[in-house]
Structure formats: structure tokens, C-alpha cells
Image (spheres, rainbow, N blue to C red):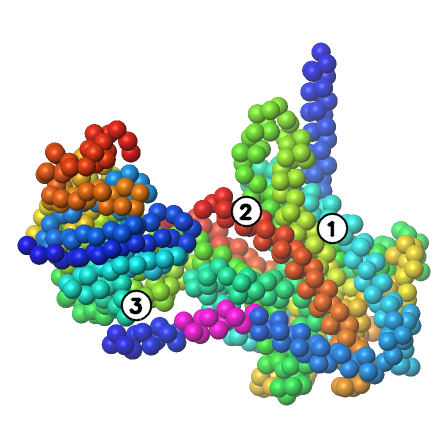
Amino acid sequence: MVDKILIENLSLQYSDGAESLRNVSMGIRENAVTVLFGPAGGGKSTLLRCLNRLNDLTDIKTSSGQILIDGENILDPKTDVIALRRKVGMVFARPVPLPMSIRENVVYGLELAGETRGSKLNEAVERSLKLAAIWDEVKDRLDEPAVALSGGQQQRVCLARVLALQPEIILLDEPTSGLDPISTGKVEDALLELKKEFTIILVPHSIQQAARTADYAAFFLTGELVEYGEGKSLFTIPKQKKTEDYIMGRFG
Amino acid sequence: MEKSLSWREFIITRLIQGAGYSAIVFVGLIFFFLLREGLPALGDVDITSLLSVRWYPIEDYFGILPLITGSLIITLGAALIAVPFGIGAAVYISEIAPRWMREILKPLVELLGGLPSVVLGFLGILVLSPYIRVFLNLPTGLTAFTGSLLLGGIAVPTIVSVAEDALDSVPRAYREGAWALGATKWQTIWRVTLPAAKSGVLTAVMLGIGRAIGETMTVMMVTGNAPVLATKLGSIFSPVRTMTATIAAEMGEVANGSAHYHVLFFIGMMLFLISLAVNIIASSVVFRAKKRAERILS
Amino acid sequence: MMTKFLSRNRHAVQRLGFVAITLMAIVTVLPIVGTILFIIYKGGSAISWEFLSGFPHDGMRAGGIFPAIVGTLYLTLGTAVFSVPLGIAAAIYLAEYAKDNQWTRLIRLAIINLAGIPSVVYGLFGLGLFVLFLKFGTSILAASLTLSIMTLPVIISASEEALRTVPQAFRTVSISLGATRWQTIRKIILKEALPGILTGVILGLERAAGETAPILFTGAAFFLPRLPNSPFDATMALPYHLFVISTQVPEMPIQIQYGTALVLLAFVLTMNVIATVIRSRARARRQW
């Protein structure tokens, strides 16, 4: 097993003084689900948004350290962020179907990448919708607007939209926070399948979900990485008092 | 392919940025050309004669005082009409009218804002002024008062829409709080909602007045065009001549580069500076209010 | 007893106040409706095919107003050519690119000021810059450029507002899928903001179509026995023509005056109604 991503001494502060990261260092394994958890405002989402440079859209006061993906520092200003974002896909907390049909949603990124061949696009639609475990539900209505789907279906279409680009890493920021338990189960099942091919980093919406899905887990508190290790051991015998307190529900 | 894409992106971004800054360029250009053509007036005409009370360009009398008082008296009259009615209508639309009524009234007020001023002037000549002449028993119906009435109508939509926005942005919780304390709707409007929207309403009034000072065609058509110094309130019932109307009426007939030409540009420069002052003051009020709103929303 | 009296009094005051305010609103709105109906009533009988498609003759006291209609169309289109791309681009800059700094605040201040400058001052500016300095002469081109700058603030403000109502999440998602900022704007944001932008554009052009003062010395012709041949020709225009025949021509038949006013009003009202319809339909159909 190798580290797909290596984060070294990453610190970041927003201009408005909100959530920040303090000197975070960790490696993230390939083909596994790594869970980032902890109370709100701990820096999980910020870290996710560093990994695909989505933070470029936000006002950042200071940042330092580096993030190596396959050995390349992606925080380097010379990084091709467009290529990076194709390689590192992201699913958001609230499903955001773009205002177009299901099919157009799925091929949106591919078309931007310059793919115009209809056969390739159709192939990608079927493959990624199947991977996201939504194909059977939408295959007859691909040209309907994506907003017409239920929340859970929308979120899986959003996942398929990311998968269509054939990324190597998938970031999920509380992807099931607005979903019912059945939809949540479907998304989690899809993740278990997906980790065979992809490196997955998940911010779960509950500790239970963290425990269910984590191969590796990292506990964040007020911008610092408190504890990081294999999911099984971290959730059963945490080494740090703070981690234990949080898992036991004593704060958070 | 990636390279060409980023080049295109770069050029488009620059173009868009250029368009964004164009507004500054245009304001600068306008001011520059007004200065360029208007400042020589100070060389052509003595400053004392410029500030005299006689405007009779054919014999080189360029006293702009009657034009200034003409503009002032008409604007004052327009404000007296437009401010109460504008705020009243805004309060009605925002606080009292049922929803369906609002859906009708808002576009109608917008429509009034879009009526060409020349149409209002036209009706002023044909319909309004004869009535005014008869009812007030005046030698002519083309007076400052006629102009004020119509200008009031022109300023109203500006006041209504800006004031209505301001009232609308008062948080609902303020009103509910007042009702919960036993205030009637009426008391809530006067003691809570209007005071809370004070800065926006003030802006509305200023912008409305700004609109009135700058209005040209209507006043040119209905005020009788007599450059007579307005000295007393009674002047409102006699013909006057505004700064804007003077430019519009005379610019077409002057020789380029003549003293008359320069003086007309000089008047334009004054109008520009007045509108600049009105808008900067009004917008500084808006900016402050907006900042507060942004803080609340973020 | 006391409180009861007080409260009855309070409600009487309220009822009185409401009646007063309602009356004020009616007094404000009624003249608009009245004006429109009056002009339709008075001008309707003047409208005929000859009036709309014929040239004026007998010192404009007879015949039609075709050249004025065509002229206003030309001026409106000319204004659109310059102000629409520039205005939308400026709105895109403000809504999508501009950071909240001193420069942006200066741009906003400039836009507010452009909106407040008296129309006759635009006329002076157009005369100084386009007619004389750039030597375009009294022409459709000079008048259109003048009207464009006057229209710009309306188009920019309305378009910016339309762009800002498009949810931020669309931008974030699009960028995260490897789109550039411009691709995001072109493929998603503009499409969603289109009805709002269109409404603003039409309202801006409506204003330009009805204006007289800015074209007085930049492009309007008192009388032209033919249609303009090129953008460098002067042109007749409906608002200026109405001004001319209602103040400058003695013994002008009243019917022609009302007819001209009606055509101008119809021109402007149609644009206004189109804008209103686009806006309300877009609101009803919006899915976010």
C-alpha cells in the first residue's frame, strides 16, 4: 500500500478568520476510504477543498505547507488546477444538479474536457451511472431535468457526474447529510464498491457513518489533526482522550 | 489545447474587466468634455455678468441666476408633490396593499418611469396648462407650477421604487415584534418600519429630486421658457426657464466655439456636478445600509 | 374603559391613515392609466396605414410619420449594438470577477452617477465627443453612442442583479468539475440569468427609445424627406418629432399630434410589457 496523497505541515487561515487548519500532516492511502471527522468548524471541509484547490474561490489570508499528490505539490501556483480538478472529483453536502438534463449533468465535465464523440459520452453516462448505483432508476429518463429526481437520486447523479471524468480521488463532503436512511445506505454501498478503483476521502455526517465506512480515520478538532489511524482500532480503542470523549458523545 | 484554452480565457477575462471599468472611463470622459467646452466660458464672459440676473444671449447677456432659480423653484415644487405621494405610495405597496394589488401597482409605477418625458410635456401643453390657466385665472398656463406638477409625476416612480425596496428590506421580525407589543399596523408603520428604513427612504427622496433637476423636455415644453429671476414664492405661477431647458432650447442654434456655446456647456457642467453630488451623497447612505445587510446575511 | 377607548381611537386613526395612504397610491397611479387611455382615445382615430407608412408633407401638417418610426427603430437598434454587449460584460465583471475593493466601489459609484446624469448633459457630451471631436457629425451613429452610454447603467444594474440570483452552488460545482470561470459563466450562469438580463436590456432600450434630449444635437433631424442611408446620416425620431410638431410648428392638426404620441407610447409600452412578461414567466418557471 502506498500513500496517494501526502499532506505536509499544511496551515491555512481564511480572511474572515473562519475555520482554519493548523500544521496538519498526514498521508492518505490509495484504494481506501479515509474518513475525516470531528465537530463542525474543525477544518475537515477546508482540508477537502485544499485537495482540489476549490479554496482558490475563497478569500484566504495565509497558507503554508504542501500537498503532494503522486509526488507533485498541487499547491504550487504553476499547478494546472483544471487538470487537478478532473483528477480529484468532489461531491457536496447538498445535491446540486446543474440546471440541465440528467445526461447533460453527467457529461458536463467530459464535454468541458473536450470530449465530443457521442459514443464515448454515451458510454460514460452508462458506466458512471451504474457505478453510482442509479442507472436502473434513471436509464429511461436521461433527458429529463435532473432537478426532477428525489434528493437521494440527485446525489447519486452528482456522484456519477464526478465518476464520468474518471478521477483518481473522490472527495465527499457530508454527501448524505440531507438524505433518508435508505438513500444513505445506497450511497455508502456505492462507496464500498468504488474504493476498489478510487481513493476516497469522506467527511461523514455522523460518527456512526464514520465507523461504518472508514478504512482509515482522522479526528480533527479546531483545525488540528488530533488522531489518525486505522478505522477499526481508532473507533474501538482511541489513543487520545479527546478522540474518545468525542466518540463517546461527551462533546460535539 | 489546454494552452489555447487558457489564452482565450485570459483574453476574455481582460475584455470583461475592461467593460467593468468602462463606467469609470465614461464618467471621466463626460466630465472632461464638459470641462473642455465649458471652462472657456469663464474667459469669454465676465464672472460678474455670468452671475447677473439677465439672460439674453443675443445681446451677450449671460446671467445664469434666473436659470438657477428657475430650476430650483420647479424642483422644489416637484419635491413637495413627489415626496409625500411617493412615500405614501411606497408605504401602501409595501405595507398595506394585498398581494394581487402589489403585482399590479409595481409594474404600473415602473411604467410611469418609462413614459417618455416628451409625451408628458405634450399632454402638459394640450391638457394640463389650459386647466391651470382657467382655474388659477392666470395669463398663461405655461408656468413653473405646471412644470412642478409634471416633474412631480416624473420623480414619483424613482421615489416609490427605491423607498419600496428600503421598506421591503426591513426584517419582518421588527414588525412582528411591534404587533406582539400591541401596536396597530398603522403605529408599526410610523414608529417602526419607516424609521428602520430611514436611510433608504432618504436616498429615494434624493434620487427623486436628482431626477427632477435633470429633467429636460417636460420643463422645456410646459414652463413658458421665460428666463426671469424667481424672487418670491408667487413666481411659481409665472413662466420660468430652467438650466436644462436652456441648454436644450439654445444649443441647436449656437455657433460652435462661441461664448454662448461655452456658457451652455458651463451650465451642463454645473448640472453634472449637482447630479454627482446628489448621487455620491445618496449612495454613501446606501452603501452603509448595504454593508449592514451583508453583515447580517453572512 | 380607558384602554378600550384608547384602542378604539387607535383603530380609528389606523382606518383613517389607511384610507389616506390608499388614496395617495390611487392618485399616484391613476394619472398613469388615465394618460395612457386618454392618448389611445385621442390618437386612435389618427392611426391608419398611410399615417404609419407615409412621409410627412405640407410642412408636416399632413401625411404620415414613417421616417420617424424607422428612425426610432434605427436609434434603438444602434443603442443596443453598443450598450448590450458592453453592459452585460460589465455586469459579468461585477457579479463574477470583481473583488470587494476600492476599485469596485469606484465602478459602482460611477454607474450610479451615470444613471443620475441629466439626459441633456448626455446630449452635450455626445455633441462634444462624438459629433465634434470624433467628427461623426449629427448622425445616427453619434446619437446611438450617446444613448448607449446613457442606457448602460440600467443594463448593468439589472444584469448584475440577475446574475447574482443564480445560486452560488452552481458555480462551485461547475468549477469543481474542471470548468474555468468563463466556461461556468457561458454554460450555466448566463443561461440561467438570461430572462433577468433580457428584462433589464429591454427596459434600458425602452428608455433610450423615448428620449429626446440626448439626441437633440447629436442625431435628430427636424424634417427629412427620405430615410437615412447610412449611420452617418441624421434621422427623424418619434420623441423629437412629437416635440417638434407640438411646439415648433404652428397650426399643427391636433390629431396628428395625438397620433404621433400614441405611436411613441405604443412603441415604449410594448417593450415594457414584453419585459414584464419575460420576468414574470421566468419567475414562475424557475426551479431553484
Chain letter for the residue marked with disc 1 in the picture: B
* Vertical comparison of C41 with B174: above or below: below
Per the model, the C-alpha gap separating discs 3 and 1 is 57 Å
Asked whether the residues under marks 1 and 2 belong to the same chain, the reply is: yes
Going by the numbered disc 1, the residue's amino acid type is Ala
The secondary element bearing badge 3 is classed as loop
Instruction: Name which of mark 1 and mark 2 comes first in the sequence.
Output: 1
Residue at x 11%, y 50% (from the top left corner): A32
Going by the numbered disc 2, the residue's amino acid type is Arg
**10 Å crowding of disc 2: few (<14), some (14-19), many (20+):** few
Residue at x 69%, y 42% (from the top left corner): B88
The quadrant in which residue B29 appears is bottom right
The secondary element bearing badge 2 is classed as helix
Numbered mark located on residue B82 in the image = 1
Q: Position of residue B255 (x, y in %)?
A: 78, 86
**10 Å crowding of disc 1: few (<14), some (14-19), many (20+):** many
Residue C270 is left or right of residue B57, and the answer is: left
Where's the N terminus of chain B, which quadrant? bottom left
Asked whether the residues under marks 2 and 3 belong to the same chain, the reply is: no
Q: Which residue is mark 3?
A: A77
Q: Which dot, 1 or 2, sits closer to the camera? A: 2
Q: Which residue is mark 2?
A: B292
The magenta stretch spans which residues? B13-23
For the residue pair A219 and C50, the one nearer the viewer reads as A219
Q: Main secondary structure of the magenta part?
A: helix
Residue C63 in sight from this viewpoint: no
Chain letter for the residue marked with disc 2 in the picture: B
Q: Residue furthest top?
A: C1
